[in-house]
Amino acid sequence: MSSDEMRVVTDDLTSSGMRVAAHAVDVAVRHASADARIAAAQAGWIGTSCAAMTAKATAWQEVTATLVGRLQDHANNFHASGQAYQQTDDTSAQSLRT
């Protein structure tokens, strides 16, 4: 293969997208569980420590939402890339047949 060639295994792109999507779900579920435990623990906190923990938990939830969104975007991009490469390959193959 020359340096200007690129070979793509579309099934690998699709598989990678599925794996990243599964990781996104796993992160969301595990972080939601942690959020629930933090919320349950906050019942015993009072005053400024409660306010500080509430603010920190909210910040962590925002970080989690951003992370999960980015993982989902990556998963979608892997999947879309696989489809695009497959469509290009199919179109090229069809043009060779005609």
Image (cartoon, grey):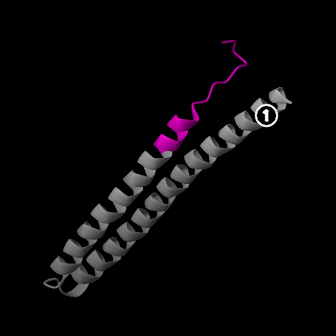
Q: Nearer the viewer, residue 77 or 41?
A: 77
Q: Is residue 77 left or right of residue 57?
A: right
Residue at 51%, 51% (x, y): give it: 75
The amino acid marked with disc number 1 is Gln
Where residue 51 appears, as percent x and y from the top left, is 29, 82
Residue 5 inside the magenta-drawn segment: yes
Q: Quadrant of the N terminus?
A: top right
Where residue 68 appears, as percent x and y from the top left, is 44, 60
To which residue does mark 1 refer? 94
Magenta residues, start to end = 1-16
Q: Nearer the viewer, residue 73 or 45?
A: 73
Q: Is residue 31 above or below residue 84?
A: below
Q: Is residue 37 left or right of residue 5?
A: left
Task: State the residue lying farthest toward the front.
Answer: 98
Q: Nearer the viewer, residue 25 or 87?
A: 87
Residue at 70%, 20% (x, y): give it: 5
